Image: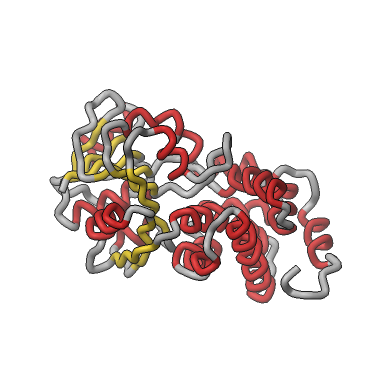
Amino acid sequence: MDVVVFGAGSWGTALTLILARNGHNVFLADHTEHDAELLRSDRENKRYLPGFEFPENITILGPNDDVPNSAFSVLAIPTAFVRSNLARFEGQSVVCVASKGLDPETGGTLSQVVSEGVSGVKVVSLSGPNLAVELARGIPTAAVSASLEEAAANLVRNAFMGPTYRVYLSQDPLGVELAGALKNVIAIGAGISDGMGFGDNTKGAFLARGLGEMTKLGMALGARMETFLGLAGVGDLFATAASKLSRNYRVGFALGQGISLDEAVASLGQVAEGVPTCKVALRLAAEKGVEVPLMTTLYEVMHAEIEVGEALTRLMERRTPTELN
């Protein structure tokens, strides 16, 4: 089938490679003509995902090229630019949301943004413990295709399913997207812990408490608890919080070593979605009356409102005798 992938960063490129290896004709759309021309000439994404040659069934599109009719399209662009690119999805019958973030304007998921901004579209959420480099290398990987439209979820699942990429179905797209977005925030905290030189005891406790905050907030917003215990939740959290390939982890690690947020993000050369997501998550938590002490403290550390040492003391001395508080 024909598939269009919007977003030629590392993640969009990795998904493009999987689809192409499965025999589909893939159109990879970049946001600038200059970058699109580099991809055409190099037949490789040397900037974001070097070392993986493009098969012949990958066609590069620039910002002014017409978007072909396709079985479905994939959204793999940074959250901050989703709204400004909605017009490019007009005419697409199914959109697979692969980006992981929350809309800064409304606090909604990206599927909600697409559904509201693109007429007549069916939306599918694709998420899981999927680090781009490992996916491109063909390391065994699993994900979830989630939608209230079963046929659309199956379409996406069947397109991506292959010998190294196993995709499951879910009927909880809200939970899948919330889990994928919120785990980026907690992964920054895991990076801070490692950057400060703490051990696995510290990170294990932090991730458990962080998963609890993700789940409580997700359920308050209407998601299912079991989604946070699956691939899109605990699976993605573990991969993102434990791997040096993770951008959010690397930002946190730098913060733990005393580097400022601006310097840490600039050194990536790509977006760390957990940074803007944290602010949105705190707004949603306040609206729903959900306590999220870890996310609150992370936000204050990221924005230099408190020192890391003070943050640690605050969390260790909280008056919470029971685990579920």
Where's residue 305, x and y in %?
Answer: 79, 44
**Quadrant of residue 165 in the image?**
bottom left
Tell me, yes or no, if residue 284 can be seen here.
yes
In the rendered image, the vertical position of residue 86 relative to residue 245, given as above or below? above
Tell me, yes or no, if residue 18 can be seen here.
no
- Give the quarter of the figure containing the C terminus: bottom right
Residue appearing at x 23%, y 56% in the figure: 159
* Residue nearest the viewer, comparing 278 with 304: 278
Number of numbered markers: 0
* Residue nearest the viewer, comparing 87 with 38: 87
Residue appearing at x 51%, y 46% in the figure: 101
* Residue nearest the viewer, comparing 87 with 295: 87
Q: Is residue 157 left or right of residue 254?
A: left
Q: Colour scheme in the image? A: secondary structure
Where's residue 137, x and y in %?
Answer: 30, 61
Residue appearing at x 25%, y 41% in the figure: 4
**Quadrant of residue 133 in the image?**
bottom left
Q: Is residue 125 left or right of residue 28?
A: right
* Residue nearest the viewer, comparing 132 with 91: 91
Where's residue 118, x and y in %?
Answer: 37, 33
Where's residue 42, x and y in %?
Answer: 23, 39
Residue appearing at x 55%, y 66% in the figure: 225
